[in-house]
Image: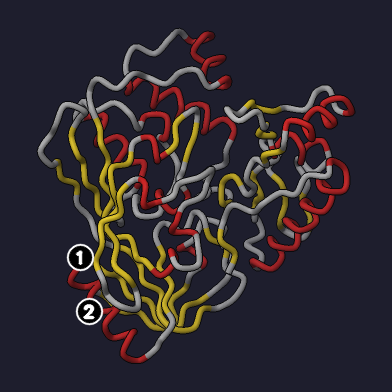
Amino acid sequence: MHWELNADLAMRHTMGCPARAERMVTVANIDDIRRVLSELTSTSVPAFVLGGGSNVVFTRDLAGVVINMGNRGVSVDASDSSGDIVRAAAGENWHEFVWWTLEQGYVGLENLALIPGTVGAAPIQNIGAYGVELKDRLHSVRAIHMDTLEEREFSLSDCCFGYRDSFFKSEPGRRWLIWEVAFRLSAETPLVLEYAELKRRWELDGAPCDARAVAKLVEAIRTEKLPDPVQLPNSGSFFKNPIVSAGHFLALNEKFPDIVSFPLADGSRKLAAGWLIQACGWKGFLENGVGVYPKQALVLINPGHKSGGEVKLLASRIQASVEERFGVPLEVEPLIL
């Protein structure tokens, strides 16, 4: 366990906004977590849990304590007919964990390769890409309550997963600190190759022969369309793809025949937020050191390392213009503090 005073947060979140933490502690195991939470609870000091910082934008300095998840470790439990239970500590790098599973012969996480962040943050957002969501592979989540220190294993149903949503994003859910995530994985899981963008790519390059080939294909696509936050500060997709009713979509499609959408099982439609933003003229926009990535309008960038307030202001302007033109509200994906 390591403590740091007046910790610089600019390099600890991928948007790179200037911010500092009054105190930051890096925890290495569950015993560290128990000790820190016990101290904070007894003194009523506020706490914020930080993983890889890829889904948070700091608009201010943080009082209290930032808990940096530094725990590591991967293990495999006894298997059953539907696969093995693979457990990973919350502080593990997500992309490195994906490749660890592939190297062990497991299939299932390859479509989620190169998503930034840590394993512990993945269930909070129910990360997803190219036809697969975390919920499709998750077995359970181990967490500890930040106020009561109760330890609990959340089942798949307990997590209440939705589109980029989970119990852990709700007000009560935010008081649970995730310290381990378990996945049900198998070598026999079928490859998921039907997502339109992925399918177009492999039809050009040749169908991938195994899960590792799919992961490499996903990496190539993501590298081409999304900026490396080390080179260009960003938080990945800044807005969720909005979902509208069938009637609303028909009205939009009549007015905007080229609108990009994806049908859902209940008849509603998921709209491509990037298309909506680009249609409003924001793609490639840059002003006062913040802007919209020229290759993908869904990504806000911060090349000037400006404040989180500047990023938030740009996001608000984009939301207003999309709602004015299409009557569709855009929901911000990252947590803005």
Question: Left or right of 27: which side holds 163?
Answer: right
How crowded pointer 1 is (Cα within 10 Å; few <14, some 14-19, many 20+) is rated as some
Residue that appears at 33% across and 84% down: 40
Residue farthest toward the bottom in the current orientation of the protein: 43
Q: Is mark 1 on a helix, strand or loop?
A: loop
Residue farthest toward the left in the current orientation of the protein: 78
How crowded pointer 2 is (Cα within 10 Å; few <14, some 14-19, many 20+) is rated as some
In front here: 173 or 181? 173
Q: Give the vertical position of 312 relative to 196 (above or below).
A: below
Q: Give the vertical position of 101 relative to 69 (above or below).
A: above
Residue 35 badge: 2
Image location (x, y in percent) of residue 113: 40, 34
Question: Left or right of 14: which side holds 321?
Answer: right
Image location (x, y in percent) of residue 140: 28, 48
Tell me which amino acid carries mark 2.
Arg
Q: In which quarter of the image is the C terminus?
A: bottom right
Tell me which amino acid carries mark 1.
Asn
In front here: 202 or 183? 183
Sequence order check, earlier mark of 1 and 2 = 1
Residue that appears at 44% across and 50% down: 160
Q: Is mark 2 on a helix, strand or loop?
A: helix
Label 1 sits on residue? 29
Question: Left or right of 140: which side holds 297?
Answer: right
Q: Distance between the residues labelled 1 and 2?
A: 10 Å
Residue that appears at 39% across and 27% down: 215
Q: In which quarter of the image is residue 52?
A: bottom left
Residue 110 badge: none
Image location (x, y in percent) of residue 270: 65, 34
Image location (x, y in percent) of residue 196: 57, 19
Q: Please say which color scheme the image uses.
A: secondary structure
